[in-house]
Image (cartoon, grey):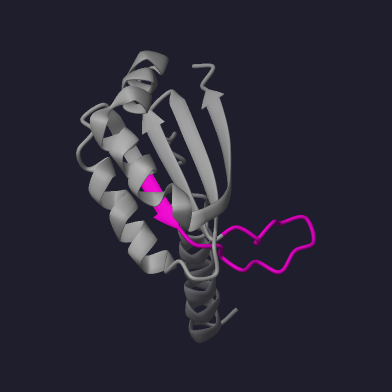
Amino acid sequence: MNKRSFIQKALLSLGAVTMASSIQAKPKKQISGRFIHMVFFWLKPEADADEFITSTESFLKQVKEINSYHLGKPAGTPREIVDNSYSVSLVVTFDSKEDQDIYQKHEAHLKYIEDNNMKWTTVKIFDSWGAL
């Protein structure tokens, strides 16, 4: 093997090692909060989803017991098993069930429901308690 061939092979090997290390899975982090409250809203046709999201976010910021939250619209993923029929999703995390209980009775939450319940036709809620 000549010097040029050796250098080319060495560079190719180095490139392969670099590429392999860069595509390794990054470390996964667990969602913060042991209690997860997932809410799916089906809005009436006349309701504006962006306005609804703004209103929802406004009340969430008033509840100190909330650990984190995510608001979104369907991603439109074209898989038969995925339900993209809802209008807006809300995922809220809490450190404990007790914090979630406080949220349910919080003045801002109750006012939000009163001010917005005429905007949806259906709401589905799924609560999950983390095992760890």
User: Which picture quadrant has residue 98?
Assistant: top left
Residue furthest toward the bottom? 4
Residue at image x 49%, y 16%?
Answer: 132
Query: Magenta-highlighted stretch: main secondary structure?
Result: loop
Residue at image x 56%, y 62%?
Answer: 74
- The count of marks equals 0
100 shown above or below 42: above
- Residue 15 picture location, percent across and down: 48, 70
- Residue 112 picture location, percent across and down: 32, 43
> In this rendering, does residue 101 appear at all?
yes
108 shown above or below 43: above
70 shown above or below 106: below
Residue at image x 52%, y 50%?
Answer: 25
- Residue 23 picture location, percent across and down: 52, 59
Residue furthest toward the top? 98
**Between 125 and 10, the one nearer to me in the picture:** 125
Quadrant of the image containing the N terminus:
bottom right
Residue at image x 47%, y 78%?
Answer: 7
Instruction: Please provide the residue range marked out in magenta.
Output: 69-86
Q: Is residue 74 magenta?
A: yes
- Residue 13 picture location, percent across and down: 54, 68
Left or right of residue 42, residue 103 in this image = left
